Image (cartoon, helix red, strand yellow):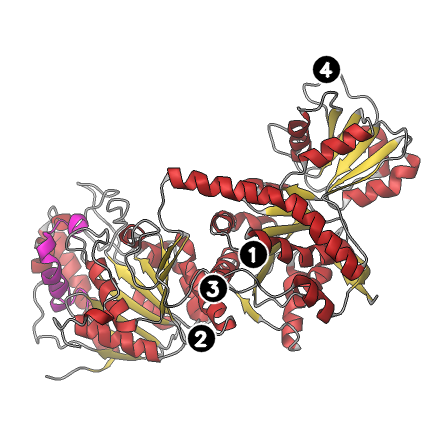
Amino acid sequence: MKTGELNKDSEMLYSGHNACPGCGAALAVRYLTRALGPNLAIVLTASCWSIISGMPPLTALKCPILHCPFPSAGSVGSGVKRGLKATGQSDTTVVVLAGDGGTFDIGLQAMSGAAQRNEDYIFVCYDNEAYMNTGMQTSSATPFGARTATAPYPLFKAGQKKDIMQIMAAHGIPYAATATVAFPDDMENKLKKAQKISGFRFIHILSPCPPGWGTESSDTIHLSRLAVSSGFFPLYEIENGVTWRMTNLQEEKRTPLKEYLSAQRRFKQMDEARMAQLQQEVDHDWDCLMEKVVTCPSE
Amino acid sequence: MAYEMLSGSQAAAAAVQRANVDLVAAYPITPQTAIVETLANFEAKGELGGDFVSVESEYAALACCYGAAAAGARVFTATASHGLAYMHEVIHWCSGARVPVVMVNVNRAIGAPWCLDPDQGDSLSQRDTGWMQIYCSGAQEVFDTVLQAYVLSEELLLPCLVVFDGFYISHTYEAVDVPEKEKTLEFVGEKKFKAQVIPGAPANLHGLTTGDNQILLVKNRHETMIKAIDLFKDVNKKYEEFFGRSYKVVDSVIPPGSTTVFMAAGATVETIRWALPELDDCGLIQLRMFRPYPAEELCAILEAHEVERVIVVDRNCSVGMGGIFSQELRAALYKMEKPPVVEDLILAGGIDLTVEMLHKALEPVNEDRLTDQKWGVDVR
């Protein structure tokens, strides 16, 4: 299906869900359920989506959602998949859905355990780069320089964002990919590809958060695109931890990171020196990525 | 009857192997490790009959069981001490989510400092999590109780913790009657509980709710768990018919004329039972079911025998209050017209109970004491 082409039958996100206007996470889950449904079961850990999914008996998705304690998503996913297999329902796709907190921080151990065991499900991290459900507190996915509720001005997030993709690649899992909401075709392609593979699959989705990032709800797609074009969030996939492949053509010259940062109030107090430092970091990560990449898409 | 020499841990594993469990999630911790190792050996020989997964923590073990049970699978895990404490959040969650998980906890002290002895504080710390708790005093009882736990748990949709002392029971061998699997399967029966996660059926399972709804759910869980007392009787009637053995929620051996009884849960029961002949005019009450708490049954026994004094052997201590089983008993007795005096012999740290201690426990308590407590270290 092409962008903008709507097939109501394949939509699994109901209208009336509880997401904020312009929520990247709502879009991400809309695309992912549309790509993977309808034979789908979702394990959902504490995150914005705990609210977005609605208050039972209401539900925002056309598939079962099993809520679970914050650190447990990776393990509950293992249980659900194995339980479905034990009861003769091996063909159901199990998705574990977690935010960056439930992936990079409190959920890392369970996810790592499941990845190492090569559990047969898709772990999807929708990354809005802080604890947004509780009001924008720092996580290890928060980028350097961002202001958060636990790093208020004149403080700022001091360390670099954790490189979760390298961590997952190091587990040697069959498939890992980055995606973001400005590129729904890319996201759906990756999810559909992941669905055909068995074993542990990891999809890292950058999901802009208007209230947290300090942006207009209408800017979500623009920001998602800037994150990619600046090289802050490159789109790529990794097979078996070793075959790295870009999935999105990059201009010879990437857009300056400053353009991406200046569009968000969380970076408002970031001075030139820190912006330069982050640009340097992004350049370095880009170079490292290019060393690993085996093929780039051509026009 | 097919007797095998089994440790308590092996007896637990043998019961799991005979219950058609779909998934065992395993993580080692002393003194529980032999349970998951025995199950792994069944798996290695192709005799487990279900899925076996070695996970990365106790937290993961129970979380994995939660997911599988929500998908309709019969599950098992075992732990002890720090492992049980580490699971705490998921322990609550399993009860709230009404998944019939059966778990064994082998009592062991919680640090600091590290200690391997069988203090009961680990399982008693999980008193208020909404799990049934049954305490066993020997390997046969462990085998029988694990089997029965599946029936209780799946009938009431409440998880069940089967508890026994580290080393005294987990590592001690006794002759255990292990019935044929065909018969145990007939007793446990097919899974009757419904899966919660049903592909194709939209459901927002255990998502955010209000306090107004939560209180109804808690009330329902409470009222359902109370039913376990009567259900335990029915289950044991059936067990008697199948295997010629049965248990009560509270057992007692009170010779006529005895006005003092010792009350205990777990391995110390057997020490007291052994010592009874030389303890003049003393009886024994074994508290087997701790949650739900069989208050009526306890009061009825105490009333019928006109018991004047209960000495509770507590291999645990709620620091700042005292032994936990004695507190629970005191709370249960307030409706009695002539409640007995309740004293406490505290064996925190999981120390040995000796016959000498029991003799000394019978000596009158110091009247200056605010509570009627004796510490094991002071009377040995």
A75 on left or right of B155: left
Q: Which mark is residue B101?
A: 1
Quick one: quadrant of the N terminus of chain A? Answer: bottom left
Q: Which residues are magenta?
A: A210-233
Question: What's the CA distance linking mark 2 and mark 1?
Answer: 22 Å
Image location (x, y in percent) of residue B263: 76, 36
Inter-mark Cα distance, 3 to 1: 12 Å
- Amino acid type, callout 1: Val
Q: Amino acid at mark 3?
A: Ala
The residue singled out by tag 4 in the image is B368
Question: Is residue B113 visible in the rendered structure shown here?
Answer: no
* Label 2 crowd bin: few (<14), some (14–19), many (20+), radius 10 Å: some
Q: Which residue lies under the disc numbered 3?
A: B71
Report how many numbered discs are placed on residues in the image: 4
Q: Nearer the viewer, mark 2 or mark 4?
A: 2
Q: What residue sits 10% from the left and 84% below the top? A: A299
What SS does tag 2 mark? loop
Where residue B337 sits, quadrant-wise, is top right
The amino acid on which the numbered mark 2 sits, given as a three-letter code, is Ser
Against A235, is B224 above or below?
above
**What residue lies at 72% left-to-right and 71% top-to-bottom?**
B182
Q: Residues within 10 Å of mark 1 (few under 14, many from 20)?
A: many
Discs 4 and 1 share one subunit: yes
